[in-house]
Image (cartoon, grey):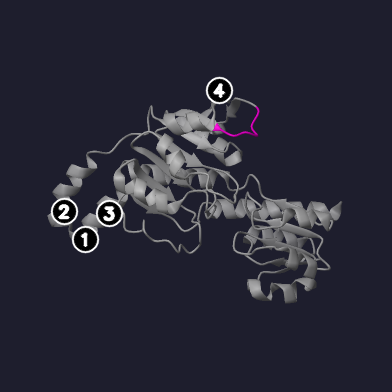
Amino acid sequence: MIKILANDGINKAGLEMLQNEGFAVDTNNIPQNYLIEKINDYDVLLVRSATNVTKEIIDAGKNLKLIGRGGVGLDNIDVEYAKKMNLKVVNTSAASSVSVAELVFAHLLNGCRFLNYSSNKLAENANNNFKDVKKNASKGIELYNKTIGIVGFGRIGQEVARIAIGVGMNVIAYDPFFKSKTIQINFNNQLKIEPINVTIDMSTFDYLLSNSDFITLHVPGSKGYLIDKNEFEKMKKGVAIVNCSRGGTINETELTLQLQNGKISFAGLDVFSKEPPEYTGFMQLPNISFTAHTGASTIEAQERIGIELATLIINHFKN
């Protein structure tokens, strides 16, 4: 019997699919420090973002045949070493695209319409603060006819573009690995609207930085900052930035300074250099919103992730 460790959990739909096919699935979390001792009991290791699959864990998993991640990136898996050891590595590349893209717009709309500020002030003292909240929130802006710069144009970046175009935004994208400038926008079949082809301005990184009203990041993790002082200096005054991608891509200390001096009008962060965040200089600023790495954490996305993971595993062992 194939034994699977879903160390960061798996949705019920995916769990039932695997069990119905005769797989034994363990959903009890084994802490990172003890995983090396236990991993040899399993044929498959499934993770999300909490568990790091290191060379040492791979070496300890003598019976491992497959490693899977419920999510888009593979930053927390030593993919090259796994492949060197003839291990199959899979991820759910499409399952969470919609949920992450929608969270991007949650942060954008929050910043544009002062939702955090309004909620906090009214909860503090609605009677005394109502007029001030109304006055300040009247400085809100629309997304319509503004330009959004999408850094990284994979599945999630393209989903952001689809929503942005639907809202009436102009789209600039930058991705050195993306070849086509045309994407197909699909609509709900109930609307009876034919898919349309939309041309995206696939620009240089510098052009995107200096011409975007809003910037959103959708890139894999990297060793250095993608957005640092030099990149902030190239941006338009009053630009907003959202990161629902990978922690460590933005210099958070520099971001704090840019939020304080008004170069950046607002920011939205779902990911951080360290999680939980260690640097908290920005936590009390009024023009920033936070979520706790929940881009893919919707009921629908988790079900799609579970089903896609289960399908990948079943197909692997059947073949």
- The overriding secondary structure of the stretch rendered in magenta is loop
- Residue tagged 4: 199
Q: Nearer the viewer, residue 196 or 200?
A: 200
Residue 150 drawn at (x, y percent):
51, 36
Q: Residue at x 78, y 70 (%)?
A: 60
Q: Residue at x 66, y 49 (%)?
A: 92
C-beta proximity under 8 Å, tags 2 and 1: yes
The CA span between labels 4 and 2 is 46 Å
Q: Secondary structure at mark 2?
A: helix
**Does residue 162 sit above or below 15 in this rendering?**
above
Residue 294 drawn at (x, y percent):
50, 55
Question: Which of the two discs, 4 and 1, labels the residue nearer the N terminus?
Answer: 1
Please provide the residue range marked out in magenta.
174-179
Query: Mark on residue 124?
Result: 1
Give the side of residue 63 with respect to residue 209, left or right: right
Question: Which of the two discs, 1 and 3, labels the residue nearer the N terminus?
Answer: 3
Q: Please say whether residue 255 is one of the residues in the magenta stretch.
A: no
- Residue tagged 2: 129
The answer to whether residue 6 of the structure is visible from this angle is yes
The CA span between labels 4 and 1 is 47 Å
Crowding at dot 3, Cα within 10 Å, few <14 / some 14-19 / many 20+, comes out as few
The CA span between labels 3 and 2 is 11 Å
